[in-house]
Image: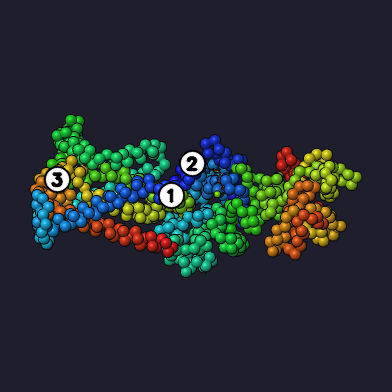
Amino acid sequence: MSNAATMRPGRPALPEWVRRLPEYLTIWVPLLLSAAHLVSFSLWTIWISFTPSTLVPVAGWVGLRNYTAVTASRNWQIAFDNLLLFGSAFVLLSAATGLILAILLDQRIRGENVLRSIFLYPLAVSFVVTGTVWSWLLNPGLGIQKLVHDLGWTSFKFDWLIDRDMAIWTIVIAAIWQSCGFAMALFLAGLRSVDPDIIKAAQIDGAGPVRTYRRIILPSLWPITVTVVVIQLQFAISTFDLVRALTNGGPGIATQLPALVVYDLMFQRSLLGRGAAAAVLMLLILLAVLLPYAAWRYIQRRRGAHA
Amino acid sequence: MAALSIRALSKRYANLEVLKDIALDIESGEFTVLVGPSGCGKSTLLNIVAGLDRPSAGTIEIGGRVVNDVAPKDRDIAMVFQSYALYPSMTVRQNITFGMECRHVPKAEQDAAVGHVAKLLQIEPLLGRKPSQLSGGQRQRVAMGRALVRNPLLFLFDEPLSNLDAKLRVEMRMEIKRLHQRIGATIVYVTHDQIEAMTMATRIAVMHQGSVQQFADPDTVYRYPANLFVARFMGSPPMNTMPARLEAENDGPVVVIGAGRPDELRLRLRGYDAAAPFVGRKVVFGIRPECIAEGSRTFSSEAPVLVEAPVELVEPTGAETMVLLRLGGEPAMARVSPDIRPAPGTSAAFALDTRRICLFDPETERLIA
Ligand SMILES: Nc1ncnc2c1ncn2[C@@H]1O[C@H](COP(=O)(O)OP(=O)(O)O)[C@@H](O)[C@H]1O
Ligand SMILES: [Mg+2]
């Protein structure tokens, strides 16, 4: 800003607020607008969840009736169980995969930049594309199973996509494929920030690579691990497009997830009040993850400021 | 027995030659300081000795054994790093025992060793803490403890005091020196601080641009710097150096500063026979600030050499007064008694200690005499 002023010496200096107008317009206006949207729609959804609204929003008060209806429904119960399974499996496996990739990449191998881009690339792909591509790959008649059959191993069976019990794992696989590169990037940054002298000291102390990682490097990564887990959990809770494209909740309702339930209630069964209640429940699950994280960050920062 | 022998060692990164033909022989029990400006290759040399880096050529012997292909852990060395390099997730005790743990030393033996070292360094109350809960000086002690507990043939220190504040640095300097006297260890100590080198070393290797300029005891390095670089690097303020001519008079060589000027300075040299080939040629004249003092000072039993010199600037430090003056028109620093404050712009009499003059060859920059 001050550059612009000094570059035109002949002109009188503009008032501060005029010079900073572009700044205000580009930062604050969108920020306030989106905050207003977020808050007002959240409040509106919360209000709707207590009304008897169906096809259109109506005023009225039904107390927690929408909530009891949602939580009693088999659809929601399956979705919630699936979320627990999918959320924990996806978060753990994707963090583990990301960590392993990061450790492998950290060996100062050739072509690191290319590999890093390859692993990060899925992040740039939309979930719908990921879901669709994996639905082809996992389709027994089109994808991997067919390929192996064509290669001659005809007894090979890989039909998780249409298996009620295993279908949820196809979502886990696709979600890991999409996001382990992100975990890898964070872990790699963490590995690279370890003081090289510490690794030299461990070498002189006689620690092999396994002991060096286990005792010295990995323990220093746990703040990054918390961040990775929270970000991935938040993604897991709000997963919608990936499932929609990959299994659409099926077979049957075997891969139902909360976001799909909300969509189903609101836009397919026109039960606005119940859909809103399900959405509010999702928000509560999200808060159950984010609030402890925020508290942890706050304590960390306080402790950092004191040390 | 030589604790460490480095022969014909060189190191290059791509086309950058970082170390050039280094040769050092370090005796057992010596406190050797590698000193030189930042970037001259000290850390690289130390890392190669430790086995953390490979030389491009040359051999390294530790305790009479060629260790070029020996892993760092088997070289019987311990190292203290500038950043201390403590393991952040371990307690002080675990930091100290980690090496023994890797070598599968029995637990009882570990405890005894930690107890001994903790007592020696007075860090017993810190054993349960994490490095993040320690002050800089305490971290420094723990890093030393980690090295001491190993009881190695050779200690390597890479600028261990650079991250401490000035007061603590002086304290730790003395403590390390005391420790060396007490345990008689062989130490190779890297620093860019020439005062640390002068005060701690039994021998100093002055490095510049990847080669050793001089390897000698501190007094020799100070009194007979091998070349202009060493002369200007060691000592604070550094040696005054200025162009001069060497001439012959009836009773020996005379060094002339500012020849032909009205304030030309002629100094008779005694005992500088090695300078004879330079008579009639240009030389670089060098004199330490403490060899220029107030006119009433006597350096030896002989009649003092007195000069009248214009005073430009006076810097009292409390312990002494530094005076910027001109000798034959060339600027020079003098170190006079603290209560003497010549007025800038006037002339004053100064006594010179001409026995400690250094003469350098202006072309090779080497010491002539
Ligand atoms: N891995 C490396 N690759 C290329 N150049 C390096 C590397 N390590 C050190 N150097 C160069 O070697 C020179 C000496 O470095 P160093 O030994 O750290 O100096 P000092 O410890 O004396 O300050 C520096 O110019 C530095 O840039
Ligand atoms: Mg260094």
Left or right position of B164 against B265: left
Q: Are marks 1 and 2 in contact (CB under 8 Å)?
A: no
Residue A95: percent from left, percent from top: 30, 49
Q: Is mark 3 within 8 Å of ligand 1?
A: no
- Residue B192 visible to the viewer: yes
Residue B32: percent from left, percent from top: 62, 53
Residue at 57% across / 51% down in the picture?
Answer: B63
Residue at 71% across / 39% down in the picture?
Answer: B364
Above or below, A139 against B110 in this view is above
Residue at 17% across / 43% down in the picture?
Answer: A244
Q: Is tag 1's residue or tag 2's residue first in the polypeptide sequence?
A: 2
Secondary structure of residue under mark 3: loop
Tag 3, which chain? A
Task: Tell us which disc is closer to us: 1 or 3.
Answer: 1
Residue B146: percent from left, percent from top: 49, 59
Query: Callout 2: 10 Å neighbours few (<14), some, many (20+)?
Result: few
Report, in whole angstroms, how far the alpha carbon at label 3 lies from the one at label 2.
62 Å
Q: Tell me the number on the disc at residue A249.
A: 3
Q: Is tag 1's residue or tag 3's residue first in the polypeptide sequence?
A: 1
Inspect the image, locate mark 3, and give the three-letter code of the amino acid beneath it.
Answer: Gly
Q: Based on the displayed image, in which of its 4 quarters is residue A115 positioned?
A: top left
| Residue beneath disc 1 | A15
Left or right position of B144 against A250: right
Left or right position of A246 against B310: left
Q: Tell me the number on the disc at residue A8.
A: 2
- Out of B21 and A192, give the one closest to the viewer: A192
- Residue B202 visible to the viewer: no
Report, in whole angstroms, how far the alpha carbon at label 1 lies from the one at label 3.
58 Å
| Tag 3 and tag 2 share a subunit | yes
Q: Is tag 3's residue or tag 2's residue first in the polypeptide sequence?
A: 2
